[in-house]
Image (cartoon, helix red, strand yellow):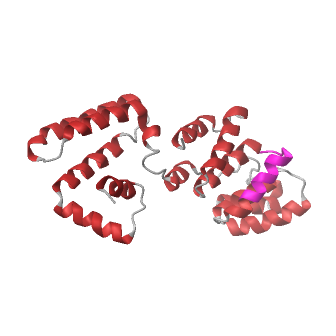
Amino acid sequence: MNNQELLYHYFSNSLTSEQEILFQNLLETDAKFKAQFEFEKDLKEAVKSHKTDNLKAKLQEVESGINSKQKKSIFNYSNLAIAASIAVLIGWFGYSTFFSTNYTSLYEDNYNEYPNTVYTITRSEDQNSLEREAFVAYEAKNYQTALNTFEVLSEESPKGYIRFYKAQAYLGLEDNEKAKTLFKQITKEHQNFVAESTWYLALIAIKEKDKTQARTYLENLVANYNYNKDKAQELLEALN
C-alpha cells in the first residue's frame, strides 16, 4: 500500500490495526509523509465549509501557511497548491466523495425529536385522560411510558397522529426498525404527518448508511413537500 492510499484509509476511518501501526510509524519517521498528512488534514477542514467564499479564504490561508514553511520542508508543495485549487473548483460536496461520508454526524446534526403539536397537556378537563398521560410522558422523554400508553390509544382512538408519535417514541428508544415500519405505514396510507415521516425515514436511512434509500426519501421531500425542504436539499448535496 502506498502512502496516498494509507492517507485515504486514515481519513475514511478504514485503517486496519496493522495499517494504523504503519501510519503512526510513518508520521514519526517520514517527514515527507507527515507534511502531506498535515496538509490534507488542513485541507479537509477547509472544505467542510459549504460557502464557496469561506472555502476559498480558508484554502488561501492554508496555502499561505504552507508557503511560509516551504524552506523547512522537503515536500513538494507546488503540487499541493494545485490540489487546493482543484478543491476550490469541485467544492466540498465533490471532495467529500474522496473522504467518506460521516453518516453519524449527518444524523446527529439533523435529528431532533418532533415536538408535541397536537395535544395541549394543560387541558383542565382532560387531567386523567390516557392521551394526556401519553403526551406528558412524551414531553418528559419518558418514551417507554409514552409508548405503552400510545399502544392502548391506537387501539381505542382513530386519531391518525397517534401512530406518528408512537414512531417518535420508538426513535427515542433507538428502535429504528419499529419506527421505520410505522413511518412507512403513514406515508403509504397518506395519513397526517406524511412529509414529517418521510424526513425521519431519510434520517434513519442515513443512520443506517443507506445512501440510496436516504436520497430517495430526500428527493421525494424536496419535490413534493415544504417541510424541512432546505435541510433535505443540503443533505442531498452532502450525500453526493
Between residues 234 and 210, which one lies in front from this camera angle?
210
Residue 22 sits above or below residue 48 on the image:
below
Between residues 218 and 136, which one lies in front from this camera angle?
218
Residue 213: image location, x then y, percent: 66, 49
Answer with the quarter of the image where residue 26 lies: bottom left
Residue 133: image location, x then y, percent: 76, 63
Residue 115 in view here: no
Residue 89: image location, x then y, percent: 39, 30
Q: Is residue 108 magenta?
A: no
Q: How many marks?
A: 0
Residue 208 shown left or right of residue 21 in the figure: right
- Magenta stretch in the rendered image: 180-193
* Picture quarter with the C terminus: top right
Which residue corresponds to the image point at 23% horizontal and 66% vertical from the top-left? 25
* Picture quarter with the N terminus: bottom left
Which residue corresponds to the image point at 83% horizontal and 47% vertical from the top-left? 188
* SS assignment for the magenta stretch, majority: helix
Residue 211: image location, x then y, percent: 60, 49
Q: Is residue 182 magenta?
A: yes
Residue 192 shown left or right of residue 217 in the figure: right
Which residue corresponds to the image point at 79% horizontal and 66% vertical from the top-left? 149
Residue 94 sits above or below residue 209 on the image:
above
Which residue corresponds to the image point at 35% horizontal and 33% vertical from the top-left? 86
Residue 20 shown left or right of residue 214 in the figure: left
Residue 77 shown left or right of residue 223 in the figure: left
Residue 224 in view here: yes
Farthest residue, direction top: 53
Farthest residue, direction front: 1
Farthest residue, direction left: 71
Between residues 92 and 234, which one lies in front from this camera angle?
92
